[in-house]
Amino acid sequence: MDPLREQQVHGPCPSAQGFAAQKSPARGRRWLTVLAAVAMSTAVPPLAGCTAPEPLESAGPLPITVEVNQSRDQYGKQAIQLLLTNVSGGPLTVAAAQLASPLFHGDILWEPTGGSLELPPGQPKSLPARLPAPVCGRGQSTAQQSSSHKSTIQQPVATVRYSEPGQGGVQEVAPVAVDPFGVLERNNMELCLAAEAAAVADIVLDRRLEVAPDSRTAVVRLVITPKEADGAGTAKGPMTIASIDGTTLIAAPADEPWPRNVRIVQGAPRSELHLRIRPARCDPHAIAEDKVGTLLPLHVSVGEREGQLKIAAGTALRGQIYDFVTAACAPT
């Protein structure tokens, strides 16, 4: 089918009529001129005498805006926050909210525990949402991914179901969500790095804390259990722990720095890194306001990825670290 015959002209546009019947060589130039005019008719206003389609009415501002955020106590827990703001000027009731991002498999869902959520105008509310499995492409370092993805990643789109007082039924709005701090991209990179590292070895903090007799220092054990090689020539890794950072609660003593450039390969025996620790701070709020002080950051590289891998202390070890910091900071 000739695509030019599919061009629809509204009204009597002489410049677009009769082009199929022009076969005379002497009128070839006019035929080309008409073709060009028809091709441009979708990009420029119609000529005088043409009847153009009625323009769509501009939709008003959306009643709800959505922002992506993450609280410190969600770090390492594969969870984020959807920050909803009611800009309609009147009260709204939110029944459901979700977020679609090409960085994750499936939607990021807020699951209401107590029914719907009242959303007063101008009062942002944070909704916790668990992240699904990340979409992991070819490995890159954190810096490389940050620079190359910013211009290519599609913006996340939220879907919010809500109702208004006096209005029957539930309405739905789909605003583009803003992610000013790059929460989705950062979590995608961290989760993809963690998945690739887990294919090489399991890395955990032992639940026991050995406190020195003077209570000023203690030792935590980082336990590394390499995975068995599958023997099919598809071994993962190797992985290298380039360095280990301190946290807001614990740090390495100056005279006993933590190991660096630790190489891990599949099939190797289980090993432990003994990390002597001291309090990183002794102000009264160190423990009371702690959110990430027991997340140990490892700078690792594995395959073609590199970045920060956070190892969380379990409940038992976390309590022992809090007790240790309290005792070590106590005046003598």
Image (cartoon, grey):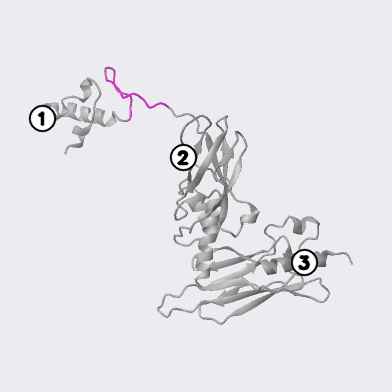
Which residue carries the number 1 mark?
A: 23
For the view shown, which residue lies furthest in the right direction?
A: 332
Marks 2/3: CA–CA distance: 48 Å
Considering depth in this image, is 22 or 284 the residue closer to the camera? 284
Decide: marks 2, 3 in contact (CB < 8 A)? no
Q: Of tags 3 and 1, which is closer to the observer? A: 3
Q: CA distance from mark 3 to mark 1?
A: 94 Å
Residue 54 sits inside the magenta stretch: yes
Whole-percent x, y for residue 72 in the image: 65, 54
Q: Magenta stretch?
A: 43-57
In the picture of the structure, the residue carrying the numbered disc 3 is 323
Q: Is disc 1 surrounded by few (<14), some (14 to 19) or many (20+) residues within 10 Å?
A: few
Q: Residue at x 36, y 25 (%)?
A: 55
* SS at mark 1 in the image: loop
Q: Assess whether mark 1 and mark 3 are in contact (beta carbons under 8 angstroms).
A: no
Specify the quadrant that holds the N terminus: top left
Position of the C terminus by quadrant: bottom right
In the picture, residue 16 is in which quadrant?
top left
Mark nearest the camera among 2 and 1 is: 2
Residue identifier under label 2 = 174
User: Could you tell me residue 193's position as x and y percent?
Assistant: 52, 63
Q: In the rendered structure, which disc, 2 or 1, sits on the residue that comes first in sequence?
A: 1
Q: Are marks 2 and 1 in contact (CB under 8 Å)?
A: no
